[in-house]
Amino acid sequence: MKWKNRVIHAGVLVLVFLAAVVIFGYVTNKKNSNMTTDMGAATRPQIAFSYNGYSLNDLPGYKNEMDLTGVRDSITPVSNGQLQITIKAYENVIESLDYTVYSIDGKEKLLEQKVKKPGENATLEIGNADGENILSEERMLQITLHMDDHDMYYYTRIVDGAKLNAAPSLDYVQSFHENALAKAEGVGIGTAIEPSDEGDNTTLQHVTIHSDYTHVTWGDLAPKVDGSERWTIKELNSTYMAVELEYRVNCTGEENEQDEYQVREYFRVRYISGSQKTYLLDYDRTMDQIFDATKKVLNEKGVLLGITDKNPVYMVNKNGTVVSFVQAGELWNYNRDRDEVSLVFSFADAENTDIRNMLMQHDIKILNVDEKGNTTFAVCGYMNRGSHEGETGSAVYYYNIEQNSVEEKLFVSSDKAYDRAQEEVGGLVYYNVENGCLYTIADDVLYKMDMNKGTKKELATGLNEDQYVASEDGHLVAYEKEDPSKSKFVTVMNLETDQEYEVTCKDGECIKPLGFMDGDFVYGVAKTEEVGTTLSGAQVIPMYKVEIASSKDKVIKTYEQSGIYVLSATFEDNMITLDRAVKDGDTYTGTAQDYITSSEEAKESNIYVQTYKTDLKETQIRLTYDDGISDKEPKLLKPKQVVLENIPQVSLDRKKETDAFYVYGHGRLQGTYNTAGKAIQKANDCGGVVVDADQNYIWERGNRDLKYSIDTEDADTEQLRQALAGGKSVVDAITEVYGSVMDLSGCTIDELLYNVNQGRPLIAVLDAQTTLMIVGYSDGIVSCEDIGSGARSNHAQSDFANVSVYLAAK
């Protein structure tokens, strides 16, 4: 799991949400009947848009109204003030359709219209309201379908497509996509891609713009699209279009005559109207083999996963005989002793014919596999069908291997789209299957909810995200009740056992929880007299040492270097990255990072991941049994779902995370950050965008003018100049003038010129004596104004190579 600047304590067993109010309802399981059934078929209507002959943006339908700022999966171009929609009602009778246009932050309603008795096709008039063009900027559209007994809600961003060259960009994507499948030669694929060492040409599972021609054109797999394709426009602006395609293909196999794959293909393209040429800016394709237990899926060495991610999600029982694993959005269980393979959970229908079931907007997290192979797992994201169809959230299930049944234990709902429901996490949700207790942090309170007794207990109050951390699997949490700059102790809790212990520091010191590694608690210690600020004026807690303590509260490792202070820590795999600083007078300046690696060896298991290669399918994945498999034709089981009269549900009505920055790239939410600088760096790496909690653009890759200059006579700019010249810190000055400030430290000057292009003055702090206001740029030259002297000067971008502190108005 990736710990991103303490932004996402993900991990945790189920899902994590920042919450304001917990609404908790319960009816005991003892009174529920023990019926079993198959998962219900999808029932919701489907909506898509037609644009220039393309069917686009097949929207998921939501059972409840969603947070408008939490749904950012697609953007739809409007043609001549109209949207053409296609409605698949299936068995539903649609009485009417409402559509409402909002500002992108959802705060202003701009247009509201109704269509009575819409047929399969309808036209939405959107261009003007009260004589004003409401598509002067990007907007949010909500469509509501009214049926006999319920409503369904659909969302997409909309933009005027007139000058955005959507049609030729889509034509290019279609041509590239079809020619790659057909392995057509001389059609421009070879000249469009950029083969380099960044591409991995040993695998067909992940292909990028840096892969070679052979891999981009599918090697020798000879793919044939199976069923329909789902096209979604992810980003659309004056500079580029980003499009994601999802579909399944049948390919030439080895163990089997044919294999089927789930494919996601991403394009970012730019159309130049003057030359009428389209350029490929980015390309990313993944394919994951569909695990089909009716075919050959075992050999004498283990379970054949085929072409799939090199780090599959799996968990093994203690005896090394049973393994549960996730493949292409499905959960499987293989029991070697019983010679059985079970499809534990899948949204796909048996015939794979209903497009509603093929939506891949969920993840499956394996929470626990006990000695017998019974598996506790969570399905997180959008629910394609079943009892929670049309909802987002996290459902916790228990697979009973002896009874061949799956029972839902609880459901945690969300009002965000699937990616935000998974990533927008600052609290903790952990379910203990042994005692039926749910643990969650909501409204700054750590709760323990007994789902059997219907009780709720406050374990700790007054928590914020700087005061607690959680382990990767969620069963450990550490928190402090005071501000980290004053706190003398941290409480560490084991949520599996309800046991806790305290970690303390000496007088004149304060302690800060950082995270967990291999079950050991990691924390930092600072001297209270040394709590200070950075060059920008932001407060920091300079930790002079970092310690790692075992579950028995014994320090097993200490990191301490003279004159070096640790400001924060990032956890990834078995390594801790330390952000460090040195003291210069009363301020702290960043210095080189350092790392702590785990000395604990990975626990050995009889079952492990192994790669192997063949000529046709190249690199493949196998779950290898050390002592092999004798019977290679297992019995296929499809467990029934236990139907309970009332499933315990927790609804988290979260307060808005106003300081969060969201990174979208490659068609997905890539992460949530609490500093704009780190978000921009991530977005630059994946060619994406950064938006704030109100969906305002903070940064876009490549979408800026070649030159731009801010009006320095502007009243706000002058006020900012005076505040800085008057001795206020940069943070205080920007906050006073603009209301909020973004820390862009760590970014390059080239990355940050986007902010100048948006009319936001950029402040560069060179040292304690020199602060520059960047007010323009042109042809590699940056125009600045010295805050102290007021002198104007021009600099080459290279002059800012060693500048690490930048701030700007939000």
Image: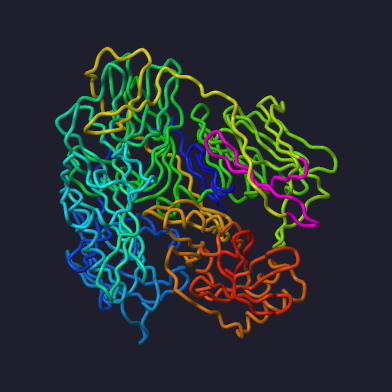
607 w.r.t. 590: above or below: above
494 relative to 404 in the view: left or right: right
Q: Residue at x 63, y 84 (%)?
A: 715
Q: Quarter holding the C terminus?
A: bottom right
Taking the magenta stretch, the answer to whether it contains residue 82 is no
Q: Residue at x 53, y 69 (%)?
A: 755
Res 51 quadrant in image? bottom left
The location of residue 435, given as percent across then percent down, is: 53, 28
- Of residues 324 and 397, the one nearer the viewer is 324
- Of residues 465 and 706, the one nearer the viewer is 706
Q: Which residues are magenta?
A: 562-588
275 relative to 17 in the view: left or right: left
Res 773 quadrant in image? bottom right
The location of residue 705, given as percent across then percent down, is: 44, 74
Taking the magenta stretch, the answer to whether it contains residue 586 is yes
The location of residue 809, given as percent across then percent down, is: 60, 70
The location of residue 718, given as percent across then percent down, is: 66, 82
38 relative to 696 in the view: left or right: left
Magenta segment's dominant SS is: strand
